[in-house]
Amino acid sequence: MTEHFKFQLLKTDGKARRGEISMPRGTIRTPAFMPVGTVGTVKAMYLDQVRETGADIILGNTYHLMLRPGPERVARLGGLHELIRWPHPILTDSGGFQVMSLSGLRKLDEKGVTFKSHVDGSLHHMSPERSIEIQGLLGSDIQMQLDECLALPAKPKEIERAMELSVRWAERCKVAFGDQPGKAMFGIVQGGDNPALRVRSAEALRALDLKGYAIGGLAVGEPQHVMLEMIETVNPHLPTEKPRYLMGVGTPDDILKSVARGIDMFDCVMPTRSGRHGLAFTRRGKVNIRNARHAEDMRPLDEQSSCPAARDYSRAYLHHLVRSNEALGGMLLSWNNLSYYQDLMRGIRKAIDEGRFADFMAETQEEWARGDLDPV
């Protein structure tokens, strides 16, 4: 651990990168997957369990936490780390995506965005400065600039307007963030599915000399090949010595292909959301435990897994729990899924260290393609 924020690139294998982010609250091994703790909880999981799966960092959401319990209250209670009993690094997103996707009536201008809470209809205003202030009150270690995220497809003029506004907001966020030893603020590259706009955004943010850079505005409905094209477009314009974060992504396949293109950090609600709905991720691919074929199948999800949820409970029992809407079903499948994601990240890091990432990727995809086998 260190008193400062530091990213060290340890190894490359093609474009895949193996590194470490050192911070006062701990080291983040990259490529890293950050479980999403939207309102201070990774849904259906104890945070001790989350840590045991191998997570070095979790994500909190500025929009949700500003609505309840409120950033000033969190600060009075000792900060988010103290409140939720997670002494390790926390990244908070800016709240911009949720303002655009969840809030009611909203008005956006140069100053920021005014919106109605989806919880109680109360009116709020979030400026770039207020977003950084909220994240500071929460005590997060990595803070994200406020940006405007558009769903795709969108009109080119709208994409350009939102991208330019996000760059101006990044400049204001940098000033508001100031100098916070041991912490970092990341900029967010926008530009939709337009390569030229993505390059303009990346170059403008690079000029701000931030501590890290995210690629936002993807995983919002576009095909995977568009997402990958945007990564390939943006990464050459970002500094190699700083971490690259692909926001809101994604499936295990998305992660593999994005690592192959030089991404260092990921977050997504998919492992826990899927678990709560009966879908398990395994080394054999996805398993829909609701399917009737599992009703009398006494095999575990994966007999080779180190996760008790995958190794020690039968599919028949998991099927029963999920079909009965028992909370334990979602808890066990979320545990399995987060464990699988962290196992995947461990395998990726090891493969890069050994200079065999391409082989690891091919072997992993081949095993997924074999599919989950029916009982003999």
Image (cartoon, rainbow, N blue to C red):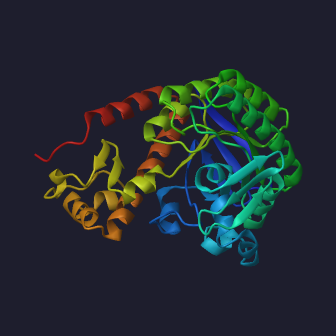
Q: Residue 330, relative to residue 344: is it above or below?
A: below
Residue 224 % position (x, y): 48, 30
The quadrant holding residue 31 is top right
Residue at 44 percent of width and 40 percent of height: 252
Q: Is residue 170 toward the left or the right of residue 315 in the image?
A: right
Q: Does residue 304 appear in this view?
A: yes
Quarter of the image with the N terminus is bottom right
Q: Residue 48, relative to residue 262: is it above or below?
A: below
Residue 84 % position (x, y): 61, 72
Residue 26 % position (x, y): 67, 58
Q: Is residue 64 toward the left or the right of residue 209 in the image?
A: left
Of all residues shown, which one is farthest toward the left? 376
Residue 83 % position (x, y): 65, 74
Q: Residue 78, relative to residue 50: is it above or below?
A: below
Residue at 21 percent of width and 51 percent of height: 291
Q: Is residue 280 toward the left or the right of residue 262 in the image?
A: left
